[in-house]
């Protein structure tokens, strides 16, 4: 990627116009204190430097944050169906509302498109900072945003986020807890239907799954990687249930795939939980509306989003903010898990 141009600041505009930074702020906030001639000189300097004050002029004088960015690499139809992101964004919005701040949400096709989008937002001063989600190994957003100087909070394990301030859940511990629970019920053949292999948190969960299966002396667990859509989760479930080593329990990486898995089990004449136990990640209303209700790894997703937003405000303010973990998802047993058939 070619080097991005140096970001022009209020200090540069003030130097070009031969005035103080306060005078620039007064001019762009249309406040008294500068003459018309000085105001015109400031505006001319800003134009010559390519400085765009559209959304940031007010923040120059009082450090106000008007908008923060969030780009998500998901199809629009899936984002609308996925309870996790609806709850997560709701938590973010609860904090933004307290600051009279807006969320600029965009869906992107890939990480390269997101890098270009973040650069565009920052150069045009459309955002004061961004929230980054769904990290990959060697994620290209890390060096790009460091070069830009854009304040950001990474939602992901520190091993994935390249030193950016991060907020994360302990996925490895949660997977271990889920498998230990199913093993305690007596299951020996446990499978996992996970998200895309390229996602860093999918890799963390996959490694933890293999590790705990080995530690407990269980049969080698089958793992299927999919997108997060119900159709893909259903297809993966069908393949697992048609295999020679049919599992007696399946752990899913989200609730939509678990609900689809329950439908496939019924289609194949299997009873949940008598013939097959199912356990979902990210507890939601969906898990409580199915029959039987779905056991799940539960955590406060709304609170997670709120904590991410609070951390971003601290980063934007220049505070010394440490990366930190939010509470680990905890098991909520319901009607979809039971001992395996004799």
Image: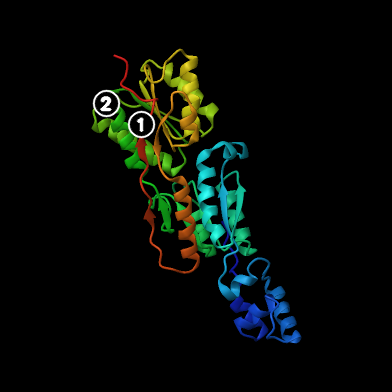
Look at the picture and state if 60 lies above or below 329.
below
Point out residue 266 in the picture as x, y percentages from the top left corner: 47, 17
Q: Nearer the viewer, mark 2 or mark 1?
A: 1
Quadrant containing the N terminus is: bottom right
Q: Where is mark 1, residue-wise?
A: 333
Q: Quadrant of residue 43?
A: bottom right
99 lies left or right of 47:
left
Q: Residue at x 60, y 46 (%)?
A: 108
Q: Dividing the image into 4 quarters, which one contains the C terminus?
A: top left
Real-space Cα separation, disc 2 to disc 1, in angstroms: 21 Å
Q: Which residue is mark 2?
A: 218
Number of other residues with Cα within 10 Å of mark 2, as a class: few under 14, some 14 to 19, many 20 or more: some
Q: Is residue 10 above or below residue 263?
A: below
- Residue drawn at point x = 56 percent, y = 46 percent: 72
Secondary structure under badge 1?
loop
* Label 1 CA crowd tier, 10 Å (few <14, some 14–19, many 20+): some
Rendered image quadrant of residue 15 = bottom right
Q: Report the label total.
A: 2
Front residue (pair 95, 35): 95
The answer to which of 215 and 260 lies nearer the viewer is 260
Q: Compare marks 2 and 1 and give the one earlier in the sequence.
A: 2
Residue in the image at 61% along x and 78% along y: 12
Q: Is residue 1 above or below residue 15?
A: above
**Which secondary structure lies at badge 2?**
loop
């Amino acid at each position: 990627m070619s080097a991005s141009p140096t970001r022009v600041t209020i200090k540069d505009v003030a130097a070009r116009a031969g005035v103080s930074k306060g005078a620039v702020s007064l001019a762009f906030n249309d406040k008294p204190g500068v003459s018309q001639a000085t105001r015109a000189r400031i505006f001319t300097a800003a134009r010559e430097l390519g400085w765009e004050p559209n959304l940031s002029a007010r923040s120059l004088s009082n450090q106000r944050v008007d908008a923060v960015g969030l780009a998500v690499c998901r199809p629009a139809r899936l984002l609308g169906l996925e309870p996790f992101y609806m709850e997560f964004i709701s938590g973010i919005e609860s904090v933004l509302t307290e600051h009279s701040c807006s969320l600029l949400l965009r869906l992107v096709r890939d990480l390269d498109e997101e890098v270009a989008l973040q650069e565009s937002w920052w150069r045009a001063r459309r955002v004061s900072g961004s929230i980054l989600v769904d990290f990959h190994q060697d994620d290209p957003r890390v060096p790009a945003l460091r070069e830009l100087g854009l304040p950001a909070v990474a939602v992901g394990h520190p091993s994935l986020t390249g030193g950016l301030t991060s907020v994360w859940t302990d996925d490895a511990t949660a997977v271990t807890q889920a498998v230990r629970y199913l093993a305690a019920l007596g299951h020996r053949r446990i499978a996992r239907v996970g998200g895309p292999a390229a996602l860093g948190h999918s890799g963390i969960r996959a490694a933890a799954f293999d590790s705990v299966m080995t530690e407990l002396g269980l049969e080698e667990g089958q793992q299927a990687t999919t997108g997060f859509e119900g159709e893909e989760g259903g297809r993966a479930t069908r393949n697992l249930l048609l295999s020679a080593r049919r599992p007696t329990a399946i752990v899913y990486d989200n609730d939509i795939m678990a609900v689809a898995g329950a439908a496939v089990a019924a289609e194949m004449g299997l009873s949940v939980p008598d013939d097959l136990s199912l356990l979902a990640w990210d507890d939601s209303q969906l898990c409580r509306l199915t029959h039987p209700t779905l056991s799940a790894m539960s955590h406060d997703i709304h609170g997670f989003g709120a904590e991410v937003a609070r951390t971003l405000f601290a980063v934007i303010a220049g505070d010394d903010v440490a990366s930190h973990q939010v509470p680990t998802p905890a098991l909520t047993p319901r009607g979809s898990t039971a001992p395996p058939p004799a």
